[in-house]
Image (tube, rainbow, N blue to C red):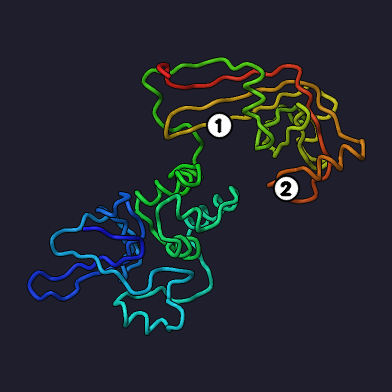
Amino acid sequence: MRAQLGDQLVIESPTTGTTRRDGEIVGLHHADGTPPYDVCWSDTHEVTLVFPGPDAHVRHPEHRPGTGHVPSGRSTGQAEAATGVTAPRVTEPNPGDVGRRVAVERERRGLSRDETARRAAIAPDYLAYLEEHPADPSLATLIRLASALGTSVAALRGGGIDLPPGQGHALLRPELRELGPDECRALLSTHGVGRIAVSTPDGPAVVPVNYEVVDDAIAYRTAPDSVPAAAAGTEVAFEADHVDDALSQGWSVLAVGPARIVTDPDAVRRLTEHAHSEPWAGGNREMWVSIRPTRLTGRRIRPADE
């Protein structure tokens, strides 16, 4: 058995020969088109991994997926009558959580739907459907989408979004390695979310901030009366990290140095124009605070045999 994306997998009754179930093949696992397949079933629109048995065969439709689920010139009802497949009803986009995360990651990486579908070996129409409607793609499809988008299945599923990171099991043979300044700068990259530790009238406080790295200085926007603003004029600690629960690995970088308010108009304009994102907290946050690290250290946990 061989198939292409967009073909129909039909399962028939062994006694009557009538169709018991059918669906669109939206994912291939082998370049030569041999099973198994990811199939989007016409009765539920759910996607599952299928190893076809002797009661299944592939139907090659006259019209393959192009720019929409329904071939041009046909109504939904005509398409259903011609193919035996129930097409998704045309409604306003109302994506599920997985679809939203796929769309965000795809757009963040500047990928078109066609390119993403090609990388993930799924039909472009199915990717469009996934991004615009609630869907439950198979694990195999999620794995290929995560690989195509440079992320993880857990991230696409949103698993653990309300849990603190690091609840996975520790490595059998972990290695805790100190990082040099150049490695720390590379991990901080150009921007991200980190934590600023400051002293306030109510005691020590640690709060998250969106940060930018410009000319080896760490800068963030805040409001004048906020906790992060209290860092100005003092020596502070800034920390950024990343934890991979799936692999039980991670790193952290700590920067210590004096913080100051950026007052030069040209410097403020440069920071604002080149900021990668608005502060996630929203509101009026136009005061820039800059930290010039005098000490930059970091650590990484990884398998000892790497």
Residue type at mark 1 is His
User: Residue 93, image x and y in percent?
Assistant: 53, 69
* Labels 2 and 1: the sequence-earlier one: 1
Specify few, some or many for label 1: CA neighbours under 10 Å numbering under 14, 14-19, or 20 or more: some
Q: Residue at x 39, y 23 (%)?
A: 171
- Residue 268 figure quarter: top right
Q: Which mark is residue 278?
A: 2
User: Residue 223, image x and y in percent?
Assistant: 81, 43
Q: Which mark is residue 209?
A: none
Residue 81 lies left or right of residue 261; in this view the side is left
The secondary structure type at the circle numbered 1 is strand
How many angstroms separate mark 2 from mark 1 (CA)?
Answer: 21 Å
Specify few, some or many for label 2: CA neighbours under 10 Å numbering under 14, 14-19, or 20 or more: few
The secondary structure type at the circle numbered 2 is loop
Residue 18 lies left or right of residue 187; in this view the side is left
Nearer-the-camera pick, 143 or 118: 118
Q: Which residue is mark 1?
A: 242
